[in-house]
Amino acid sequence: MTSPEGAPPRNPTRRSVVLLRPVPGDSVIHRLWAGTKLLIVFVLGVLMTFYPGWVPIALVAVLVGVAAYLAHIPRGVLPSIPGWLWFFLFLGGFTASFAGGAPEFVVGSVTVGLGGLLNFLRITALSIVLLGLGAMVSWTTNVSDVAPAVATLGKPFRRLRIPVDDWAVTLALALRSFPMLIDEFRVLFAARKLRPRPPVANRRERRRRWGIELVDLLAAAVTVTLRRGDEMGDAITARGGTGQISAAESTPARRDWIAMAIVVVVCALALTAELTVLGSSSAR
């Protein structure tokens, strides 16, 4: 018999959210221009904003699933869902079911309407699909490609004297610093948990200790942010300044036009179904 010591743990380590860190690979999704991905997310977001029906949500979900399959996205990048989130989802669905509405069915002498529950499920599915769209861009796009793409897409606005290049550089710096700051904050919270806590006698001392710990965390966070910003500034200066971030050549290729054509077809199918026989959104 296998000893209990050699058995695998029943509760594996929770996986954290992977943000702004591309999954290594050389798939057709990875090779798409960053501007194409941003445009696709914008177009699909507008579609589901005005027509949040089941058909558009399902078609966009299938599109995201196919893109994830082509990009070879592993399951390990998906975060673990905490138990409290399942509880709130169940609570939200339970309370929404009291709204009633069509479709309805009769149980004995009671008429039960599923309209509120279906609306809650539709909003939940819409949120998951939108998160999947954003995650696909994060997992398949290098952060350094975003600023040149934004600068290229914003060329028409330069005639209006809008500082597109400055906005692109600001966006690139924010996207680059965000993962580093998240890692630093995780280290700070881990160090806080390992710090021995002196015993407290009453609630007043406990609140005072919480205030001291909060001040320590804020001071450490500000220090880490300034240090990371100084290091990033030195690195950017050594590479030629902020102008080099948005000055890189960035243009779409043939595969980008094919991807946009597929998205247009999906949007046309969704609108046709939503505006004719399968409409389920309030905007029809």
Image (tube, grey):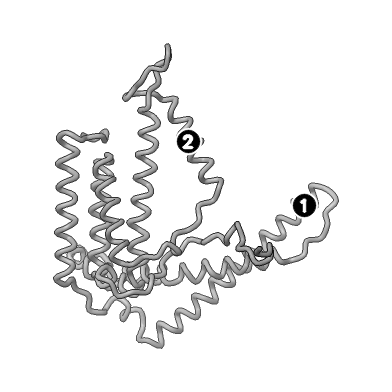
Q: Secondary structure at mark 2?
A: helix
* Residue at mark 2: 92
Q: Is residue 129 above or below residue 258?
A: above
Which-is-in-front pick, marks 1 and 2? 2
Q: Is residue 252 left or right of residue 117?
A: left
Q: Which mark is residue 206?
A: 1
The percent coordinates of residue 69 (x first, y second) are 31, 62
Q: Nearer the viewer, residue 194 or 172?
A: 194
Q: What is the crowding at mark 1: few (fewer than 14 residues within 10 Å), some, or many (at least 20)?
A: some
Q: Amino acid at mark 2?
A: Gly
**Residue at the limit of the structure toward the top, as seen here:** 109
Q: Nearer the viewer, residue 196 or 171?
A: 196
The percent coordinates of residue 219 (x first, y second) are 63, 66
Q: What is the crowding at mark 2: few (fewer than 14 residues within 10 Å), some, or many (at least 20)?
A: some
Q: Which mark sits nearer the N-terminus, 1 or 2? A: 2
Q: Amino acid at mark 1?
A: Arg
